[in-house]
Each structure stands twice: as C-alpha cells, then as structure tokens.
Image (cartoon, rainbow, N blue to C red):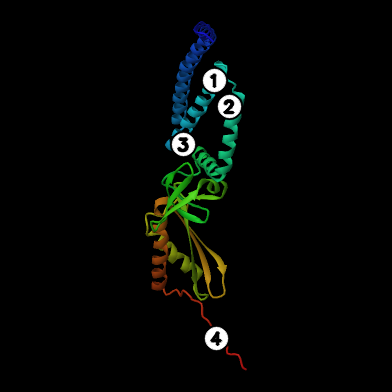
Amino acid sequence: MDLQNWIDKGYELMLEYTPKVLLAIVIWIIGAYVIKYLKKGISKTMDKANYDISLKKFLSDLISWVLKIILIVIILGTLGIETASFAAIIAAAGLAVGLALQGSLGNFAGGVLIMIFKPFKIGDFIEAQGESGTVKEIEIFTTKLTTPDNKEIILPNGSLSNGNITNYSTEDTRRVDVTFGVGYDSDIKTTKEVIMSVINANELILKDPAPAINVNELADSSINFFTRVWVKKEDYWTINFYLIEQTKEALDAAGIDIPYPHSVEIQKNE
C-alpha cells in the first residue's frame, strides 16, 4: 500500500470518527457536570434528612462511581465500540465480588438500615446480641460499644440490624424496680411506710408517675414488696443503689427483719 492509500485511508477514518470523538467529548463534559450536580444535590438531601456522615459520604461516592461507569459505557457506545461484552464483564465481576463479600455486604446493608431507621444513636446505652454498652461509633460494617467497665465491643451490623435491640436511652425517664423481702411477722403497713420514707427523702425520685409499693409475693420465708419508682434516665443507677442501701438501713432501724435462706442438712442413716 503506497503513501497515497495511507493518506486516503486516514482521511476516511478521520471523517468517520471525528464526529464521534467530538460527540463523546461533549457527552463526557455534560455527563461529568450532571454527575457533579446530582452528587451535590443528593448530599444536600441527606444533610436535610440528618443522615450519618459516614453513610452520607459512602452513598455519595457509590452513586458517583455508578453514574461514571454508566457514562463510560455510553461514551464507548458513541465511539462505536461494542458495549454488550463490556457490560457482561462488569456484571460478572460484580457477581464474583458480591459472592466473595457476601457477609460484608450483609453488614453493609445492616449499617445502612441502622443509619436510616436510627434504632439508636451515638451515646445511647443499648443491649443487643447478648452485649450491652454505650454506643461509641456507628460505622458502615460494624457498631462499637463501650461497656460500663470500659471494654470495647464490636458488633457486625448485619446481625445487629436483624436482632432484638433494647435501647435504654430513648425515653427521658426510666423505672427502677427493686424487691424487698421481710419476715412474716412484719407489719405490712409499717413496712410500706418505712420504704416510702426512704423514697420521699430523695429528690431525684420523680413524684409523677407516683412511686408504688405492693406486696408482690408470699415466698417461702418472706413477704416480698415490689417497689417501683420513676427517675430521669441519667439517675437510674444512682437511685437503684440508693434504694437498696438506704432501705436496708431503714428496715433495720425500724426493727423489721429481713430473712435469709437457711440450709438444713439432713443426715441419711445408712
């Protein structure tokens, strides 16, 4: 093939592909602008919805990359490149990655659900998956708790979002339940008055809802009084310990007996 033929061939290719290349460039510029605009709009929408910052960044980047892949496929099609096989390769690769990361994807989905429905937030005290503690971090794949004795517990979001969650911090108030057992020779009315005097002496115990003291059980060796008081959630443990300690001292001072189990050893004649 002589030089002239090369020139003619190059001229034909230029006439054929120049418009396609120019169109591809225009599509890329417009597409990049649209993706940037959409990413910004989605970010603002998530800001208004108070999405968690880690979820917002992850979803924003994920959407951006998906749109860029779609844009590249469109540009390749504009240039006349067969995109069916290209799309098949992407689909196969996505399936392989999905199977390999099945557990991680489940945790990711669980993290998204937690961040969207917000069954708890950072700072809440929760009980889940047999563990309890204060929520320290909510990440895409895991949630970190800090236990009362300052241990860190990491829970996978997949199982966490699918299991039962007890949130002790959702409501402003909590009820403290304590049971006191006294001897059968103790006067019920006097016992209630002694316990109520301990309750009335502490200003952290709320008046509304009113405290309640009821005979809950006639046990083997004691009459059990079920005591219920309401407190602000941050005062729960303070009042729990207060009631146990101060009621014991008050019952002792009033001469009301608190029985304890007695074990009787029976000797078997051989």
Asked if residue 9 shows in the view, the reply is yes
Residue wearing tag 2: 86
Q: Earlier in the sequence, mark 1 or mark 2?
A: 1
Q: What residue type is disc 3 on?
A: Leu
Cα separation, mark 1 vs mark 3, equals 32 Å
Q: Earlier in the sequence, mark 1 or mark 3?
A: 3
Q: Is label 4 in contact with label 2 (beta carbons under 8 Å)?
A: no
Circle 2 — which element? helix
Q: What residue type is disc 1 on?
A: Leu
Residue wearing tag 3: 55
User: Of circles 1 and 3, which is in front?
Assistant: 1
Cα separation, mark 1 vs mark 2, equals 9 Å
User: Of circles 4 and 2, which is in front?
Assistant: 2
Cα separation, mark 2 vs mark 3, equals 30 Å
Residue wearing tag 1: 76
At 55% from the left and 39% from the top, the residue drawn is 97
Cα separation, mark 4 vs mark 2, equals 83 Å
Q: Residue 134, position in %: x, y?
A: 42, 51
User: Of circles 2 and 3, which is in front?
Assistant: 2
User: Of circles 4 and 3, which is in front?
Assistant: 3
Quarter containing the C terminus: bottom right
Q: Residues within 10 Å of mark 1 (few under 14, many from 20)?
A: some
22 up-or-down from 46: above or below: above
Q: Earlier in the sequence, mark 4 or mark 2?
A: 2
Residue wearing tag 4: 265
- Residue placed most toward the observer, 134 or 234: 134
Cα separation, mark 4 vs mark 3, equals 64 Å
Q: Earlier in the sequence, mark 1 or mark 4?
A: 1
Q: Is label 1 in contact with label 2 (beta carbons under 8 Å)?
A: yes
Q: Residues within 10 Å of mark 4 (few under 14, many from 20)?
A: few
- Residue placed most toward the observer, 140 or 5: 5
